[in-house]
Image (cartoon, rainbow, N blue to C red):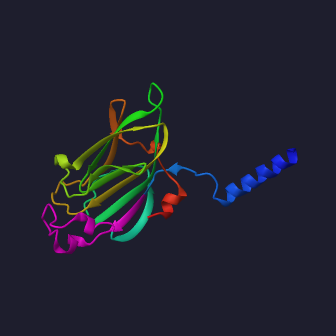
């Protein structure tokens, strides 16, 4: 009987190894960058604040490269005509009383922004907007259990109109009444995220 148990255990370990082993979380989100057509086929002329066409028709057009970024806290982008998809996992700690935590998310982005958590689209604002307008602050609240949750953030940058335009792309969260940029210590990715565009 002991020999059978050992054989079963060895077979199970070999199967796990062949399947790629357990998922290993590494620090940072994977950012997939895309180059989008400048001026969007003439529908977003220079010095115009908003395009006359649907951003869906012009974003995520040509894959450029991917890299791991510790967090989403960009500023002074300056050069437009690109889109980014950050993918990975966010680690949620138990609420002070234990159990699930209510998490408020905010994307401060100039221009378009979307947020998905565990496959649910919490923020859908795929439109041009200036960083100093209320539209650039998108918020959603969700209750999450402790542990790792799938997160995807999408963003596009078109025109940079003002001299002091910083074109921010930032991900905040509010837990327990405190708002801050989601810290690098809570963002992770796997090898699969590196391979999937």
Identity of the residue furthest to the top in this view: 97
Quadrant housing residue 104: top left
Placement of 39 over or under 83, stated as above or below:
below
How many badges with numbers are in the image? 0
153 within the magenta span: no
Residue found at the very far left of the displayed protein: 48
Q: Position of residue 142 (x, y in %)?
A: 36, 39
Left or right: 173 with respect to 26?
Answer: left
In the rendered structure, which segment of residues is drawn in magenta?
A: 31-60
Residue 173 placed where, x, y %?
A: 35, 40
Res. 72 in view: no
Quadrant in which the N terminus is drawn: top right
Q: Is residue 60 above or below residue 109?
A: below
Q: Residue at x 42, y 67 (%)?
A: 65
- Residue 126 or residue 164, whichever sits in front: 126
Where does residue 20 sit, x and y in percent of width and height? 63, 58
Pick the residue in front: 141 or 61.
141
Q: How far from the left and from the top, in percent, is residue 118? A: 43, 48
User: Farthest residue in the bottom direction?
Assistant: 41
In this orientation, does residue 120 appear? yes
At 20% from the left and 75% from the top, the residue drawn is 41
Q: Quadrant of the C terminus?
A: bottom left
């Amino acid at each position: 009987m002991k020999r059978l148990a050992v054989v079963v255990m060895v077979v199970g370990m070999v199967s796990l190894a062949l399947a790629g082993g357990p998922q290993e979380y590494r620090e940072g989100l994977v950012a997939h960058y895309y180059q989008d057509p400048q001026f969007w086929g003439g529908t977003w002329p220079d010095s115009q604040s908003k395009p006359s066409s649907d951003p869906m028709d012009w974003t995520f057009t040509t894959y450029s490269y991917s890299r791991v970024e510790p967090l989403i806290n960009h500023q002074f982008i300056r050069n437009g005509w690109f889109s980014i998809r950050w993918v990975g996992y966010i680690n949620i700690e138990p609420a002070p009383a234990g159990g699930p935590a209510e998490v408020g998310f905010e994307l401060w982005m100039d221009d378009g922004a979307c947020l998905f958590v565990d496959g649910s689209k919490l923020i859908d604002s795929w439109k041009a907007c200036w960083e100093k307008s209320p539209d650039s602050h998108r918020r959603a609240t969700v209750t999450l259990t402790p542990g790792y949750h799938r997160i995807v953030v999408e963003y596009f940058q078109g025109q940079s109109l003002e001299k002091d335009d910083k074109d921010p792309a930032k991900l905040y969260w509010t837990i327990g009444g405190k708002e801050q940029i989601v810290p690098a210590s809570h963002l992770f990715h796997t090898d699969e995220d590196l391979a999937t565009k």
